Image (cartoon, rainbow, N blue to C red):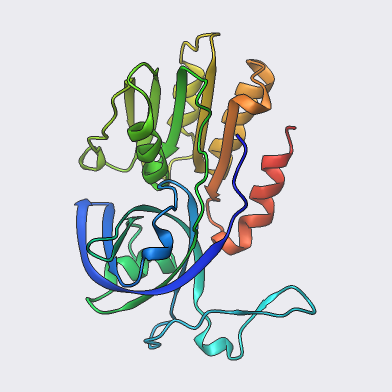
């Protein structure tokens, strides 16, 4: 899956509206100059910059050319940075859409989405060039994730050809969080209702119970660190999937903030070559 060289644009956008699609899922509509994002791939990972409480502007960090590090002149106004997937862009309305998993006040992104008021600012940094999310030659797909992965899985599902087949397994917190995801492909959906506080993951068990065909296939797995690690090991080691047949990356690690767990998550991704 060759990629175009990435260019990144950073914008400060304004909250225009928000909608609770389910009890634990919020769609945020941002307004502003989104023209540079017209070629951004829906489903790609991007960064959001959340101002601290009491700060009404977004202060982006500045790259230090000597150290190669992003720095803030004043840490008191430094935003929290989190990884998110945008849902789409509407150039005619100057709008950008981002879906947030609602964890209440547990984490800066969820806190912002729940409490933000119309007119509040949010910084967004996105790739302005297209990114390929899945290989066009595969005809069977395994899509796995939790509520944080619904935006990217939804984007993949919408893009699949009508001739494609596969299975989509998604873990949510309650029956009310089950969504109607659109696809032309012949996809079997399995929704697992499970609280994140449980020790054993039904997501891992569900994948291990699947009957997976041997024909041309591709898997996209995005969930909590432990789930992804177990699923990747199962597919790569036990079922002997090749590296090109699987993209698996953890968006978060239970009990650890995103910026504190990134080293562990990246190292685990590289652990199975």
Residue in the image at 64% along x and 49% along y: 265
Q: Which one is in front, 147 or 200? A: 147
The x, y position of residue 269, in whole percent, is 67, 41
**Near-viewer residue (115 or 128):** 128
- Report the quarter where the C terminus lies: top right
Q: Is residue 29 above or below residue 44?
A: below
Question: Image height check: is 239 above or below 254?
Answer: above
Specify whether residue 213 is in view: yes
**Residue at (60, 34) in percent of width and height:** 1
Looking at the image, residue 3 lies above or below residue 16: above
Q: Is residue 148 above or below residue 189?
A: below
The furthest residue to the right: 66
Left or right placement of residue 243 versus residue 15 in this view: right
Instruction: Using the rendered image of the protein, determine whether residue 106 is visible from the camera's viewpoint.
Output: no
Q: Residue at 26%, 33% (x, y): give it.
A: 182
| Residue 41 picture location, percent across and down | 44, 48
User: Which residue: 45% across, 32% down?
Assistant: 144
Q: Position of residue 217 (x, y in %)?
A: 53, 18
In which image quadrant can residue 180 be found?
top left
Image quarter of residue 258: bottom right
């Amino acid at each position: 899956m060759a990629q175009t060289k990435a260019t990144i644009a950073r914008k400060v956008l304004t909250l225009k509206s928000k909608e609770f699609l389910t009890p634990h899922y919020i769609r945020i509509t941002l307004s502003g100059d989104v023209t540079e994002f017209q070629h951004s791939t829906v489903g790609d990972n991007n960064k959001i910059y959340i101002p601290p409480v009491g700060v009404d502007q977004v202060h982006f960090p500045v790259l230090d050319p000597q150290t190669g590090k992003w720095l803030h002149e004043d840490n008191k106004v430094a935003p929290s940075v989190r990884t998110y997937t945008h849902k789409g862009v509407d150039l005619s309305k100057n709008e950008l859409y981002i879906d947030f998993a609602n964890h209440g006040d547990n984490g800066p992104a969820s806190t912002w989405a729940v409490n933000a008021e119309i007119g509040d600012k949010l910084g967004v940094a996105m790739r302005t060039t297209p990114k390929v999310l899945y290989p066009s030659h595969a005809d069977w797909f395994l899509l796995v994730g939790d509520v944080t992965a619904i935006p990217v899985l939804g984007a993949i599902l919408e893009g699949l050809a009508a001739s494609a087949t596969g299975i989509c397994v998604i873990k949510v917190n309650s029956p009310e969080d089950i969504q109607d995801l659109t696809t032309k492909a012949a996809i079997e959906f399995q929704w697992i209702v499970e609280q994140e506080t449980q020790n054993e993951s039904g997501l891992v068990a569900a994948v291990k119970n699947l009957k997976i065909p041997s024909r041309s296939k591709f898997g996209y797995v995005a969930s909590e660190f432990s789930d992804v690690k177990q699923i990747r090991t199962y597919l790569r080691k036990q079922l002997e999937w090749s590296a090109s047949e699987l993209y698996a990356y953890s968006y978060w690690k239970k009990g650890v903030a995103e910026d504190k767990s990134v080293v562990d998550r990246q190292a685990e991704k590289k652990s199975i070559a």
